Amino acid sequence: MKVVILCGGKGTRLREETEFRPKPMVPIGNRPIIWHIMKTYAYYGHKEFILCLGYKGDMIKEYFRNYLWNTCDSTLMLGRQQAAEFHDRHDEEDWKVTLADTGEDSMTALRVKKIQRYIPVGESFLLTYGDGLSTIDINASIAAHTASGKICTISAVHPAGRFGALKIEDDGSIQTFVEKPQVEQAYVNGGYMVCDYNVFNYLTEDPAIMFEREPIARIVADGQLHSYRHEGFWQPMDTYQETQYLNKIWAEGKAPWKIW
């Protein structure tokens, strides 16, 4: 199943880092956070990625275009017949990465709409943000989505109170969705979504619309939003303090998301 990752936002709450690079390129250890997210999906067998680029997208393009240069030791021949030898192999050699320009100022709904052409008609896909790490079981979320028969399933996580709050019924269906509530709720939107192809019917070419607002509200109204409850680790990287925390537990060898 293809994995769509939203990578185009300006990350204004993490200005200490995003003034110089897009948030998905902020490092955790010696690799950008987007690499960690992709490694999670790859662990569950999902290795075809579509990255929705926007703000400073060229830096993400450069990283993947020169992946061997960025991740391997190398030897260079500097004569007229220049050559390079890379000394390391890596587990990402079977990844397929589509780098899609989705607009400098587009909101999330248009970013998803613009990559519709890369999703075969009728095929479901995975969707997440380029700034959150989790121990979520991707394949279990897919199974829950399939069993629900709904158009979209989002992962419901326990969090830090400023994301989309969910009211979840006993059967897993979602009756209300409140974007960025003022008070902390039991569950919030943690991303790591599963979407049927029909989700594109809820999206338009309007660059000002957030996927998490009008489209989700319409999906809820149609009774087509489902949840997968994740009780384990989930941590966004919205602030400099959260960046420091993620780097700290990675350096200490205590990163719970490192399952590969």
Image (cartoon, rainbow, N blue to C red):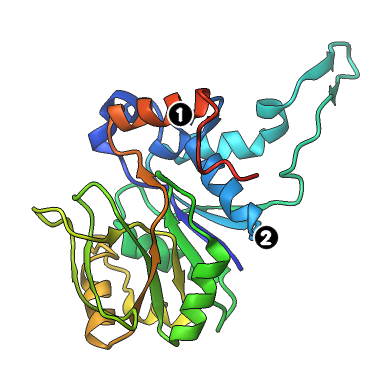
At 50% across and 29% down in the image, what residue appears? 250
What separation in Å lies between label 2 and label 1 (alpha carbons)?
25 Å
In the rendered image of this protein, does residue 32 appear above or below residue 118? above
- x%, y% of residue 42? 64, 53
Q: Amino acid at mark 2?
A: Gly
Residue 27 marker:
none
The quarter of the picture where the C terminus appears is top right
Q: Is residue 248 left or right of residue 238?
A: right
Mark 2 neighbour class, 10 Å CA radius: few under 14, some 14 to 19, many 20 or more: few
Q: Kindly identify the residue that appears in the image at 54 percent across and 62 percent down.
A: 138
Report crowding for label 1: few under 14, some 14 to 19, many 20 or more residues within 10 A (C-alpha): some
Who's the residue at 40% across and 36% down the image?
22
- Residue picked out by circle 1: 249
State the residue lying farthest toward the left.
182
Q: Which image quarter is the N terminus in?
A: bottom right
Residue 253 in percent (x, y) is at 55, 28
Residue type of the residue flagged with mark 1: Ile
Q: Nearer the viewer, residue 47 or 136?
A: 136
Quarter of the rendering containing residue 186: bottom left
Question: What kind of element bears circle 2?
Answer: loop
Image x and y of residue 31, in percent = 56, 30
Q: Quadrant of residue 258?
A: top right
The residue furthest top is: 79
17 relative position to 44: left or right: left
Foreground residue among 190 and 61:
190
- Seen from the viewer's position, the closer of residues 81 and 105 is 105
Q: Which residue is mark 2?
A: 45
Tell me which corner region of the image, top left, top right, bottom left or bottom right, holds residue 177.
bottom left
Q: Residue furthest right?
A: 81
Q: Is residue 99 visible?
A: yes
Relative image position of residue 153 (x, y in whole percent): 40, 73
| Closer to the eye: label 2 or 1 | 1
